[in-house]
Image: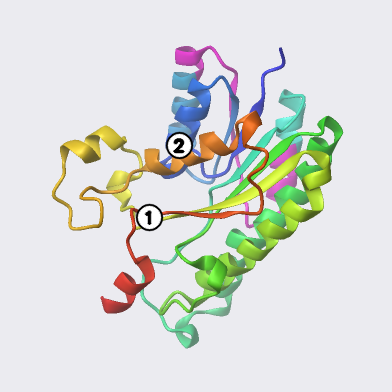
Amino acid sequence: MKKKTALITGGASGIGKKTAELLAENGYQLVINYRKSESEAVFLGKQLGERFGIKTTAIQGDVANKEDCERIVNETLSEYSSVDVLIHNAGPYIHERKKLTEYSFEEWNYLIQGNLTAVFYLSKLIIPVMRKQSWGRIITLGYDRVETSPGWIYRSAFAAAKTGLASLTRTIAMEEAAHGITANMICPGDITNEWKEKDIIEAVMARGEKNTIGRQGTGEDIARVIRFLTDNHSDFITGSIIPVTGGIDVLGKTFRK
């Protein structure tokens, strides 16, 4: 039986890393894309390959760059017969709180390209491969309530890109449904950096966080939903925007800070 292959952008760390771990556990071959974290990507691929007996490849590339996206796909298809799952996890983010007028033209363009245009690049290149096999899963990442096009103070470029991506994800779902390809967006809650690579059990053991369910969100919370969406029997779920927030009003919390 042919093993499926998943391409995870930004897969060397954080939520991408947890996703790689869970998909490897399910027998997926992995292409781990990274921009700068070469040693982390190579180590993760080797570790998962040995542990689960799967083939893995680490490929460098900045998804905001069209030529890099073309190279990532070409190198992937030279190693694997197909790309069955495409997870758009990578996306630049500026932590500094800036009003729209304080963004440089370069910063604005890079955030839009990395969070929105990159999805067009990779999807355009990979969807024809998925069509040939009449099966595919495309998963993007957004933020809480993105489907309502809310304003996000000090995050204008990132928010504009992700709200556009929500529409693009749903359009892909409609256009590709006849080819057995689903497209969905997952919207993580306020998962802080140190928790992006942790497991749910660790959060349960550290209860006491002041949020709705009494524990911190983790990378595993997001990775479990991604794994579910890749299942053959999840084909009825497409064009969905799925919040995984622990019930927290993420934007309201940000606005009050």
Q: Residue at x 86, y 33 (%)?
A: 132
Above or below 152: residue 229: above
Magenta stretch holds residue 147? no
User: Where does label 2 land, which residue?
Assistant: 224
Which residue is tagged 1?
245
Q: Is residue 96 above or below residue 182?
A: below
Residue in the image at 71% along x and 48% along y: 122
Q: Position of residue 226 (x, y in %)?
A: 52, 40
Would you say residue 58 sits in the magenta stretch?
A: yes
Left or right: 181 as drawn, with respect to 185: right
Q: Who's the residue at 43% across and 34% down the image?
A: 40
Residue 163 shows up from this direction: yes
Residue bounds of the magenta highlight: 49-73
Residue kind at label 1, given as amino acid type? Thr
Of residue 153 and residue 79, the one placed in the foreground of this image is 153
Tally of numbered tags: 2
Which secondary structure, mark 1? loop
